Image (cartoon, coloured by chain):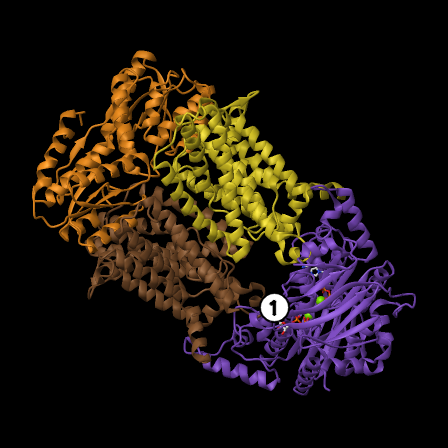
Chain colours: A orange, B purple, C brown, D yellow
Amino acid sequence: AKPAASEAAPAESASAETASSEAAPAEKEITVAGVVFQEDQFMKLMQKGYEEAAKNLGVKCMVSNTNNDQAKEAELINTYVSQKIDGIAIAPLNDQSSMQALKAASEKGLEISVGNTKLKDAPFVCGGYTSDNYMLGQQTGEMAKKFIEEKLGGKARVAVVQFKSQLPTQSTERMNGFVDQLKDLPNVEIVADQDAWMQDQAVQVVGDLLTANDAKGGIDIVWAANDGGTIGAVMAVKNAGKAGKTFVFGTDAAEQQVAMIKSDDNILQCVTGQDPFQIGYNTMEVLIKAIRGEKGEYGKETIVPGIVLSRSDIAAVDAFATVLAEKTK
Amino acid sequence: MSVLRAENITKNYPGTVALDNVSVAFESGKVHAFIGKNGSGKSTLVKVFSGAIEPSAGCFYLDDEKITLSNPQEAIEKGISTVYQELSLIPGLTVAENIFMGRLPMKGPIIDWKKTYEMAQKILDDLNVNISPKQLVADLSMWQCQMIEIVKAMSTYPKVLLLDEPTSSLANHETELLFEMIRNLKKKDVIIIYISHRLQELWEIADTCTVLRDGKFIGKTIMKETSHKQLVNMMFGDVEIKTRPDDLTVGDKPVLQINNLCRKGVFEDITFEVREKEVLGIAGMLGSGRTELLKSIFGADHFDSGEIIFKGKKITNPNPVKMRNAGFALTPEDRKNEGLIQIMPVYGNLCVASLDYIAKGAFIRKNKEQEYVRRQVKDLQIKVPDVHQPVSSLSGGNQQKVVVGNWLNTNPQIMFFDEPSRGIDVNAKQQIFQIIWDQSRKGVSSIMVSSELEELIEVCHRILIMKDGKIVGEVKPEDVTVQDLYALCMGND
Amino acid sequence: MKTASFNFQKFLKTYVMEIVLVIISICIAFSAPGFLTAANLLNILRNTSLKGVIAFGMTMVIICGEIDLSISSTVAMSGIITALVSGKLASAGIMPMEYGVILGVLLAMIVAALVGTFNGWVRTKFNIPTFIITLAMMNVLYGLSAILSKGFPVTTLPAWFSVLGAGQIAGIPVPAIILIIVFALIHIVMQYTKFGRSVYAAGGNPESARLSGVNVKRVKIVVMIAVQVLAALGGIMCSSQVMSGAHNFGKGWEMDVIASVIIGGASMNGGIGKVRGTFVGLIFLGVLMNGMTLLNINEYIQYVVRGGLILAAVLVNTLQSVHKK
Amino acid sequence: MKTASFNFQKFLKTYVMEIVLVIISICIAFSAPGFLTAANLLNILRNTSLKGVIAFGMTMVIICGEIDLSISSTVAMSGIITALVSGKLASAGIMPMEYGVILGVLLAMIVAALVGTFNGWVRTKFNIPTFIITLAMMNVLYGLSAILSKGFPVTTLPAWFSVLGAGQIAGIPVPAIILIIVFALIHIVMQYTKFGRSVYAAGGNPESARLSGVNVKRVKIVVMIAVQVLAALGGIMCSSQVMSGAHNFGKGWEMDVIASVIIGGASMNGGIGKVRGTFVGLIFLGVLMNGMTLLNINEYIQYVVRGGLILAAVLVNTLQSVHKK
Ligand SMILES: Nc1ncnc2c1ncn2[C@@H]1O[C@H](COP(=O)(O)OP(=O)(O)OP(=O)(O)O)[C@@H](O)[C@H]1O
Ligand SMILES: Nc1ncnc2c1ncn2[C@@H]1O[C@H](COP(=O)(O)OP(=O)(O)OP(=O)(O)O)[C@@H](O)[C@H]1O
Ligand SMILES: [Mg+2]
Ligand SMILES: [Mg+2]
């Protein structure tokens, strides 16, 4: 997949349409649910997107969190089905194991839209805005490749930090996206591949890797597959006094990553972030529209490309930070 | 007729030889007393017979069949039934369930509850025990538990009945009930082995007497042909039995005054005083409220009304910390659960109450601690190879000495002894009495509760009689005989 | 009248948790209209059932004075084994998935039973607390599950398999039926069989039980097996609900399971507890979660409420039993 | 000679875990060249220190016969409180972050102490097991932390604050120094003070201890406070390492903390345990995690190895102490 930015639904036009559908009179009250799967900043913002869209479109919205528990996801969907609500906007836990319960719900007449995680072959979905995890890895990977070629003379020892124990599919796709970009560089070597997705965990694991590799030529690049890993990796490099020797590339962007990219310690080079609020907003919007009869193409999900934030384009970083600050209020 | 015969049984524990090559035989239709001082190995031999432990060497036979047991279940199946020295009922279950534990009557795959209760009721009636089979054991008092233990052991209609100090927590009339049961069993040709430290009762119930000393078999005698003195000689070699020395005096000043102390349903309107150097006894039947009274005064349990005046000062809201600091000490009746910390080493147990004394500020002074420990081990003649061993590895009597030692280390001004001689041998008892007297000479007052009335007469200056939670009388030991005292306690007016 | 008031008191004591449950339910029913519908109540029962079957096993374990933290990994492992066996047999052409999955279920149960045997054996042989044995086992099984599934969900399950977790019989969800059956079974075992009473004895005072001829070791091993097999059942039902097995299923369930047992009045010290109580505890937690979802309560507040109510429930239980004495 | 062989046996018994640790370290050193460097060893110490300070507190709690599962939420909460206080004071113009953060740290510790007091109070007042009290508290505090932080990481921390988690003094990481200080402190308290002895007594047999004039309730409350305050310290060090506070920090730490205490030879039944043992347990887990990272072992296998070695360690400990008897 190529970073085809054009595929993204323009947010402005979406909210413009809102006004017209809001005005539609004499309609029975619609209740929808917005489900996310984890308690982190990304999901929190996505949830806010759900709520904002529902508010703007004048429908009642219930939100919940499946907490990375596949059974809890099924339970929540069951509960919503038994409440006979009109539709569910969901960030599914897994592209396969989340299918069953959602399909059953759709058979019971609920509209389903998905955000963040693309489902495998789901013709019942009324629409969605999902990330292509491969692409998220790839976008950072391209920047890393450029960096290695320009700044490191094409030679690098790379460590990666994943979140496989937490979300194996997403993590692996991002990993592949990143690694594939470095494949044709003959002097790049992946020297370590470990799991650490929480900040504190990542600080320790990356710290260990840095000292342990000192004797073998050090680590030039650390790439982290998610939010916690990225922050932890940066802190580890900083704490080990390796700023300027080891450079971090990451995935996911939030306030702290923005500050790190803007920091003059020159550790974090680039992250690929997303706009979870917008993903949530759009996912909810497409759901409500389908419920109101404005059906789109079933089974089609729009891929939302990542937003590359790097030291070479501080203006973009600032723009991202401004939007983020507004949403986190 | 059947015979239980032990052959060269040896049991080694690290640092101790609990049984040393013991060979002895017990015939059916007789009650075999089994005695020896604390730590002589009686309980250990019983546990070998009951399958609770395996001997290090040797074996035993029942009717010439060699018995090897890998668990207590097999012993029960072979007809060997045991009442252990330490109570062993399950508090969360009913009396009936405890009696038939492991062999509840079934209806198909399901327990026949009706039959269980009927059977339990029947055996309770047979043995003349007035406790409902549906009661939870947790709600029973200590002596009721003891009765249930015996009922439980009897309920298997055993060939061999091992009783390890069954009377240590029974009062006289209950003991009498038990003896009645035992005599009945004797007629049924059962081998009965009976361990007790209450030598007096042996002539009443036993036919033969087997003596162990330091894990070795000393001899087996016919009860009727043996005198008290002979038995004691066998147990200890030579010891002298002391009586209360004459030099003990009682001061004039009251040390402790108790006024109208009440606790609803347990005791009421308790008023008495203890004077300087006085050894005050409290006699009474089991369940008369003595333990609760001592614990309430000591602040370990609450009371509803009344006052405690110590050296002229009223003590309000007592609690153990306060009372200990004021100079009180209490050796509880249940040493296993209330007196000792089983997993702690002996030295730790000797210094729990006296932590404030061995410490300077927050810190424990090791040399002071060592001094305190050494003093008690020496003075109380505690038999322990190494004070770093857990206290649980000591015999009952030595454990009791550790409890007393723990409190002597606080230099108390008034000591409460609750059943200080329960389950300890004559020699150790004498030592404990000696300690009480020594304390008196040093100006310490004591209150001693005991179910062995002759002990109270031997030890105390004055005896209060408690019945159903009330003080019903006061006597001087020199004025009464054991029989008088017993009658007063029973209160058959 | 004296007798009447006495009976009322006794009723209050015996059914205190039930009464609290009813009060909470009434409160929720007033604020959330969708709560008191047959569909929703059945839904609560269904949602409760996966953890529920495990909780009944855990009740035995806790009464026996032990604990099992490894059930969460067993949940994951059994789903994976079921799906893998059914998939492999089909792809090897030995047996279509429709039948193969049954062998998968059996194998999952057998493996769980072996895990339980191991836990129990280590407990009784070396006298190591089950808390730590099963904590270690939780890690081991989690890793093994992930290795088995290579970290990805295994979805090779036949369509009919979804009956176990999502089917209905006469309008009643199948998992709810399974829950009731397991409840009845374990209730009977604990109240009316020798084994059940031995569990109480072994938990109440192991040494006394041993001296009374109860084979305490065997009892402990058997309950450790039972909870594992029931965890496998829960895991299989979970896999059936989502038609796949993955190594991160069941994570954190042990805490909910233990919480419902304790809310139900069992004592962590062993010897005390009732299967019926656990049922109430389960429904209690189920109603709470469902109610909060319906009332759309903020998820963070949900944690606070949940924690507060667990504490309150245990408090009520304790005060009531102190009162009893 | 007899005496010599006896001494050797005693040595073996006393230092069995240390010996196992050395053997494992040697094995790792041979396969991972980076392992046996001063930098890496200091790294292990630093990585161990966050959970380590908590583990020393937990040792007291476990010796006292109790447990605290809520420490994970305290870790999160204290980081959030620290960052929030420093941020709010700065944004309100009252005090620059550089100073405000100190007030934040103090407040975090005070709140933790209050939580510990509450845990201990409920334990001693109502006789509810701490397992369930702190399980409930874990939920409550987690929810509260998330509410406080609105679910987002709070990053308002001054630059100097990173010293606590990431600084060095004379080449030694500050957290490692904190670890050693806390170790020394608690070791002294447990081995050489009245209070320490009371903790052993209260854990070994609370009733006997009470009747001997030990204020068992106070002892229990104090250890529950201690572990909470140390959890706050751990949380503050954690926040300092990553320069933010968030509600999902510390999740699952309680299991690692408890595991190291148990590996260190403490008994879940109370009365037995050593702070020194916990230190060995910590290093044991730390070396293991570090070694596996260095050897780039697959994370799923890591779980299996971890579980297996926890079990093995406890087994060794148990066998050794059985032998001792
Ligand atoms: N589990 C054990 N470990 C180590 N030593 C033990 C153990 N059990 C008993 N002993 C030791 O074995 C010896 C015999 O103890 P036993 O309990 O048989 O004595 P006893 O004659 O029943 O004494 P008492 O009259 O005080 O009950 C004692 O020295 C005791 O310390
Ligand atoms: N914790 C308790 N709760 C309720 N009742 C109790 C409790 N402890 C004791 N009792 C009751 O209080 C009464 C007095 O018991 P206490 O133990 O003080 O008697 P005692 O004279 O010391 O006899 P014993 O020799 O059996 O200890 C008994 O009826 C007993 O059942
Ligand atoms: Mg004995
Ligand atoms: Mg008494």
Pointer 1 residue Cβ closer than 8 Å to ligand 1 = no
Which residue lies most toward the right here? B247
- What is the quadrant of the C terminus of chain B in the image? bottom right
Which of the pair A146/A329 is nearer the observer? A329
Q: Is residue C263 above or below residue B48?
A: above
Chain letter for mark 1: B
Which of the pair B43/B480 is nearer the observer? B480
Q: Residues within 10 Å of mark 1 (few under 14, many from 20)?
A: some
Write down the quadrant of residue C228 in the picture.
Answer: bottom left
Q: Position of residue D82 (x, y in %)?
A: 45, 32
Q: Position of residue B298 (x, y in %)?
A: 69, 61
Residue hosting label 1: B69
The structure residue drawn at horizontal position 38% and vertical position 53%, both measured from the top left corner, is C256
Q: Secondary structure at mark 1?
A: loop
The answer, for residue C139, to whether it is visible in the render is yes
Compared across the picture, whether C77 is left or right of B474 comes to left
Q: Is residue C229 above or below residue C198?
A: above
- What is the quadrant of the N terminus of chain B in the image? bottom right
Ligand 1 placement by image quarter: bottom right
The answer, for residue B17, to whether it is visible in the render is no
Compared across the picture, whether C71 is left or right of B10 comes to left
Count of numbered badges drawn on the protein: 1
Compared across the picture, whether D80 is left or right of D192 comes to left
Write down the quadrant of residue B366 in the picture.
Answer: top right
Compared across the picture, whether B435 is left or right of C313 comes to right
Write down the quadrant of residue A46 in the picture.
Answer: top left
Q: Is residue C69 above or below residue B449?
A: above
Q: Position of residue B258 (x, y in %)?
A: 73, 66
Which of the pair B164/C183 is nearer the observer? C183
